[in-house]
Image (cartoon, rainbow, N blue to C red):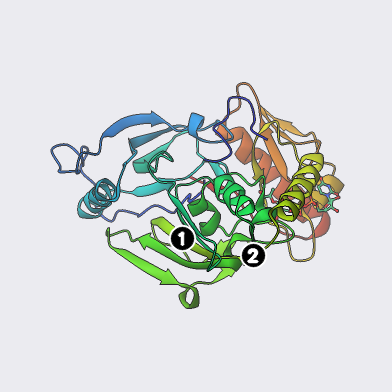
Amino acid sequence: MNPPDVPAPDQPDAEDGAVEASAEPPAEPFADADLAGATVVTDEPLAPKTWLRVGGPAQHFAEPVNREQLQALVRRCAETGTNCRLLGGGSNLLVRDEGVSGLVIRLPKEHWSDLTIDKVVGSVTVDCGAPLSHLVAETVKAGLAGLETLVGIPGTVGGALHGNSGGRHADVGSVCESVEVMTRSGDICTRTRDELSFGYRRSSLDELCLLRATFALRPADPDALADRARKTWILKKSSQPLSHQSAGCVFKNPRGQSAGDLIERAGLKGTRVGGAEVSDRHGNFIVTGEGAKSADVLRLIDLCRDTVLQRTGVELETELRIW
Ligand code: EPU
């Protein structure tokens, strides 16, 4: 399902909100600061780090390799009033052409993907920078049921939890037991099941960074799980433009309706603005091609929303995060 030249599906989506600064932050907030060895670069292109492959750069960008570095970066942002955002796999994110101010942090999966399975208890604990696909594959292999129908969903575990990723049969929140998080002031704490709430494409996890999560799963036959995952994957492939540059579904489904169906019935499939197009395979996907701009995608989103509203009275709400 990996579109050519697009970051691996396993890379998210904690496209978390930024900390809005109240006073003007210093131009060089990270110069001479003790960042526990973390490196900050400037004007880092974000387009190649997103699935839509459009949009401008991050003013500052860092990939901390451990908690100390992450904490030092987050604390420095808090001290200096610098906006701080977390980039996950970039699979549900549109970055505007002008780029983003402040710091964008991405957790490199080589350093943030530890996974431990306890088959006796039926639980799995995983670092939130891990690809969701890795978590799904490992739990299926271990014969633990609950995540197998999330096959083919791109992004990181953190991004999946943040937006409660899922499909028709399950979502990630329904089996989540606890999540260790880092707040915008750099403090680490654990949110347990009774403090968490998950809804359709939303969660109460609004902290800057999700660090590690535990899921409670049920023992099952690995072959049966693999078979279920395979069937879900085949269905997905038959209806979604998975070989193109896209960010999955653009809009949430309105209650009891399908956004893709509404867009199709409004005659919008195949509509182009610049280098962006409403997929002719699935109406709720926008695909980008050569020369596409973020502005093209935004205009297409507005066109879909306005046309569907005019024709049906239904107001579509974006699922895609926009920076
Ligand atoms: N449909 C159309 N035309 C279209 C698209 C869909 O008529 O262009 C109809 C289908 O024929 C079907 C119904 O709408 O009867 C539902 O379509 P589909 O099975 O494709 O599911 P969906 O509701 O469009 C949701 C999730 C997907 C997830 C699939 C499968 C949302 C917004 N989308 O799509 O998630 O993969 O179910 O579980 O909830 C995503 O969130 O990024 C995403 C891709």
Side of 143 where 36 appears, left or right: left
Q: Residue at x 62, y 33 (%)?
A: 296
Q: Can you tell which of label 2 and label 1 is closer to the viewer?
A: 2
User: Where does the image place residue 273, in percent across and percent down from the top left?
Assistant: 69, 31
Residue 5 appears in the figure: yes
Residue designated by label 2: 219
Foreground: 319 or 182?
A: 182
Give the SS element for disc 2: strand
Residue designated by label 1: 213
Side of 294 where 127 appears, left or right: left
Distance (Cα) linking label 2 and label 1: 19 Å
Query: Total label count?
Result: 2
Q: What residue type is labelled 1?
A: Ala
Say which quarter of the image contains residue 276: top right
Say which quarter of the image contains residue 38: top left
Mark 2 crowdedness (10 Å alpha carbons): few <14, some 14-19, many ≥20: some
Say which quarter of the image contains residue 29: top left
Give the SS element for disc 1: strand
Residue 199 appears in the figure: no
Q: Residue at x 35, y 55 (%)?
A: 19
Q: Which residue is drawn at 81% across and 52% down?
A: 262
Side of 323 where 6 appears, left or right: right
Q: Where is 62 relative to 5, above or below?
A: below
User: Where does the image place residue 139, in percent across and percent down from the top left?
Assistant: 59, 54
Q: Which of marks 2 and 1 is nearer the N terminus?
A: 1
Q: Which amino acid does label 2 sit on?
A: Pro
User: Where does the image place residue 255, in percent across and percent down from the top left?
Assistant: 74, 66
Please give the label number shown on residue 246. none
